[in-house]
Amino acid sequence: MKAEARPHFDPERFTFFRRELAGYASAVSPGDPSKALRILSPTTMEIAELCTGRATVDEIKRHFAARYQQDPNGALGSQVDEALLMLSLYDLLSIEDDSAEPEIVEAQPAVRRLEEWDFLALRLFLNAGPFPDKLAPPVIHFRHPYVTIEMYSELLLRMRLFHQREHFFALWCDRRIEFFLSLFDERPLKPVASVALVAGLSGVPLAETVVRVFPVLEADLRGRVHKLEWRTVSDAPGNDGLFPVLDSLGLRLEAMLTDEFGPGRHELIYTKVLVLQPDPAV
C-alpha cells in the first residue's frame, strides 16, 4: 500500500461487527455476498483503530511504533503492513490516496496502470460482470505456460495488486475494463517482467490493442526492470495472432528450450531490453 494512502476502518458500514473478549473482534465485510465471519486479532484491531481516513500509512506506522518506543521502519512497521493487507483482503478498509489523480471518465478508450482501488473493476472484468447480468466472459488470448487460471482467484488477485508483485495494465472505456495485460515482476531473482496474461472482451481487436497498451507499460516499467520477457509454448493456439504483433514491438527470440513440454512442444522465450531514454539536457 502506498505510504500516502489514507486507509479508513469504519465498522458502521460493515454488514456485522462486534467486539469480543480480550481485544478480539468479529466482522463481516460489507461487500462479501457469502457473509463470511472474520475474526480480527487484538493487534489487528489496535492498528485498525488508527485507520481513521485522515492518517497516512506512514503516519499510522509512526503512531503505532511510538506506543512501544520502536522504530517505525522495523518490525512494528511490517506488522502494520501485514494488518492492512489482511484488512484489505477482507474488504474491511476503504482507501483514499491524495497522490492519485482525480478520476476521469474517458469517453474514448484510454490505457493506464491499475492500482489497488481498481480491484472491483478488474474483478468484474474477469468475472464477466455482476450476477445475474453477466456478459460473455473475456477471451484469454495468452496465458504464461506456468500460470493457471486459479492464480487469478479474487483473494490471490487482491494480494498481488496490494504487493505490486504483478504489473497490471488495462484499456478502459466508461469506467469499464475492455482489455487487460499483466506481467510478473521477477525481481529480486532477475530484473525481468514476464507477460503473464492477455485477455479482452469479445470484439476488442487483439493486435491493435496490444500495440496500444505496450508503449504505456514500457514507459511505466523502464528504469524498474531491465527486460520484458514473453514465454510461450511453440504450439499454443494464440501464437499465430501474437507472434507478428510482438515482433513489431521489438521482442526477439532469445532462446528455445527443446521438448520442454513434451515431444515437439518447445518453450520459446522472446525478450526486449528496456533502455532508459537519454536525458536531452545532458
Image (spheres, rainbow, N blue to C red):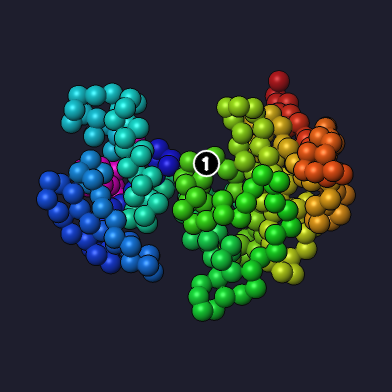
Q: Main secondary structure of the magenta part?
A: loop
- The residue at 24%/24% (across/down) is 70
Query: Which residue extends farthest left?
Result: 21
- Which picture quadrant has residue 67? top left
Magenta residues, start to end? 46-58
Q: Nearer the viewer, residue 25 or 163?
A: 25
Q: Position of residue 272 (x, y in %)?
A: 78, 35
| Magenta span includes 53 | yes
What quarter of the picture does the C terminus occupy? top right
Q: Position of residue 151 (x, y in %)?
A: 56, 51
- The residue at 48%/41% (across/down) is 163
Does dot 1 land on a helix, a strand or a loop?
loop
Q: Is residue 9 visible?
A: yes
Q: Is residue 97 above or below residue 104?
A: above
| Magenta span includes 7 | no
- Residue matched to label 1: 164
- Which picture quadrant has residue 227? top right
